[in-house]
Amino acid sequence: MTQEPKVRLRGLYKIFGNNDKGVLSHVKNGVGKEELLVEHGHVLGLQDINVDMQAGEITVVMGLSGSGKSTLIRHLNRLIEPTAGEILVDGEDVMQLSVDGLRGLRQTKMSMVFQKFALLPHRTVLQNTAMALAVRGSDEATQTAEAQKWLDRVGLSGFENHYPAQLSGGMQQRVGIARALTANTDIMLMDEAFSALDPLIRTDMQNLLLELQEELHKTIIFITHDLDEALKLADHLVILKDGAVVQQGEPQGILMNPSDPYIEDFVSDINRARVLRVKSVMEPLTGTEFAGDVDIRDNLESMIARSGGDTSLHYRVMDGDTPVGELHMRDLVKALVPRLSSSEA
Amino acid sequence: MAFYDGLFKALGLSDWCDGGASNAPMSMADLLAQNSGTDKEGAFFPFPSLDNLNESCSGIIQSRDVTKGIEDGFLAAKPALKTVLDPITQPLSWLLDGALWTFASVPWFIMIPILVAIAWFASRSVAVTVFVAFSIMLLGLVDHYDVAMQTLSIIFVCTGISVLLGVPIGIAMSKSDRLQKSVVPILDLLQTLPTFVYLIPLIFLFSVTESKLYGIAIILYAIVPVIRLTDLGIRLVDQDVIEAANAFGMNSRQKLVGVELPLALPNIMAGINQTIMMSLAMVVIASLVSAPGLGVNVLRGIRNLELGVGIVAGIGIVLLAVILDRVSKAALSRVDMTRVKH
Ligand SMILES: Nc1ncnc2c1ncn2[C@@H]1O[C@H](COP(=O)(O)OP(=O)(O)OP(=O)(O)O)[C@@H](O)[C@H]1O
Ligand SMILES: [Mg+2]
């Protein structure tokens, strides 16, 4: 990427405890999370996080419970103060902001969607949606118009005057998303936004998000502990473990080349045929005879269906109208087996 | 020969002991004991109290010197305290007198509809409103309308002031753990002190003819729950919602007015309900220090053994209590209703 990242985290550390700056040197000298807790009574939240988040992309941060995902996302708008490190938004150091400057950043640059929705129970859906505008002090008419627009967009027309408690979880989270969209910020922070929803609603919401992203091109930082969700949404995937980044990069790449047993474990359960795409297994274009053309974005599952399971076939891979490579069904089948088991064999 | 003589001799303090003699006035009990000629020498091993030690060694003060000392201290501090407290508390007297005058001078056929209307707007409940109307009529029927209005007016003023002072104090406490730590013991003290004990320092400071005397006693007693529950209510507000408010860049005023107070309102209302009930309890006791109202009749019943007068006034107090409780509870549940669930 040549473009300046929208958000950069540089050497970010977070230690929970009274003397966090004091024990930082231990962490830098390689003291682990457990040792720090037992010997120094401090909880290691994040260590040496370096992540660039590109404008217009969905950066997904994934990790197991307690790996520090929520802690990480709350640093971006300084709901949590770091122990050390830099947080740059549009090249500006968030740590240098005054109280007013920080409030301005939260009002105009970042909006947030929460796992537990966190709507105001005493305000109507419309008032909740208009919250960011009300905070900024824009006039009543603008508030209503904007809020209405986004409520319609997330499919909640007709519920304006309901109270949050009258809506189902999925609908409440739609309000949460409409509230964040109404704020009209470049950056959206989503902390396990869909984790509290049941699987069908969850798929709906993921599709809604992708659809919105298609037209809005926001910079979205999305937290999840679900690999399927991560792979579906991510342009850039960051995997956290015990407060440290174990691997980050393009999701297909991580799936094909997990750098760590932890990630191999993670990816071994996934339906690879559905997640992996032609792009990840294709070879440079050399041959001339092909059984047909396929799109670079097709997933492997559809290729297996198309070839009828014949591993001797070769296809030409197209990106739009230009041929970009070739696909050997034999490679495809090999890619379906996670590297872990292939190395054991 | 007193029991502890030997002790002071052994310590070699005899000289010092004979030096000073107590000059505190004798209490009535001491005088009586002296006259009847009985001496307390009978005890085999008396407790080493100040008085018993004093018999062997007049250099040691007597217990009555202690009470006298406290009294003198209080009296010495009184002018200074008065110059500070008098101007601050004077408006309370005016308010109480004004309210008493207003309630007394508005004719019953206007006053009763106003009260019934207040009950309706606070509770929006037909049953509660009818009950209020019925109770006031009943009080009027047995000629207790005037005294009941006096009691009610004092409760209005004292509850109003308690809320005006208590809610901001509660808010401040919820924002500062240090403040909370230092205020809670005071609140505990105010709540555990027997109600009579409040009256003692107040009688010293203010004259019994001033209405602020009982006003302060009532407020000190009744303000506690509204402070406690405001503090608690704000601290209990869902932290996720607070985080959302922060994430959208609310300033502390927007957060307080737009999020914390509305979400703490059910708790604050519960505090106000208790404050009202405690003002009623205290206004009865404050009749000892000239607070007018139903309590005066109860007092008369006790002092003169006028059983009927006391009981009727007592029933009047119960009626008032039920009215105030029902109305404020109905208002409370209405506040909760805005968090519609159905
Ligand atoms: N305020 C705090 N004080 C002390 N430790 C904390 C605090 N907040 C978080 N932690 C610790 O930091 C670590 C990371 O917590 P965090 O909430 O970021 O995890 P998470 O990845 O979001 O987990 P989950 O998926 O359960 O939400 C945990 O070990 C947690 O105990
Ligand atoms: Mg979390």
Image (cartoon, grey):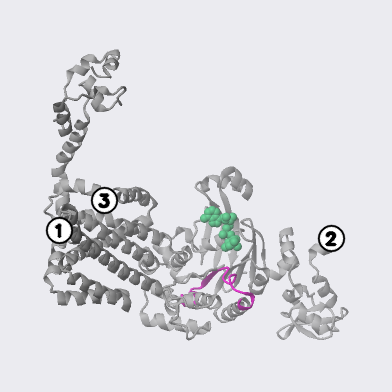
Is A181 a magenta residue?
yes
Quadrant of the rendered structure where residue B97 is? Answer: bottom left
Q: Which of marks 1 and 3 precedes in the sequence?
A: 1
Residue A296 point in image, percent of width and height = 73, 80
The residue wearing badge 2 is: A344
Question: Pointer 1 indicates a residue of which chain?
Answer: B
Q: Residue at x 60, y 43 (%)?
A: A39
In this rendering, do the residues under marks 2 and 3 share a single chain?
A: no
Mark 1, residues whose alpha carbon is within 10 Å: few (<14), some, or many (≥20)? some
Residue type at tag 2:
Glu
Please provide the residue range marked out in magenta: A180-201
User: Tag 2's secondary structure?
Assistant: helix
Residue nearest the observer in this picture, B134 or A171: B134
Quadrant of the rendered structure where residue B89 is? Answer: bottom left
Q: CA distance from mark 2 to mark 3?
A: 82 Å
Marking on residue B195: 3
Residue nearest the observer in this picture, A261 or A158: A158
Quick check: B269 left or right of B298?
right
Q: Above or below — where is A120 with respect to A298?
A: above
Residue type at tag 1:
Ser
Mark 3, residues whose alpha carbon is within 10 Å: few (<14), some, or many (≥20)? some
Residue type at tag 3:
Thr
User: Tag 1's secondary structure?
Assistant: helix
User: Tag 3's secondary structure?
Assistant: helix
Disc number lying in front (2 or 1): 1
Quick check: B262 left or right of B95?
right
Question: Pointer 2 indicates a residue of which chain?
Answer: A
Residue A336 point in image, percent of width and height = 80, 72
Residue nearest the observer in this picture, A161 or B47: B47
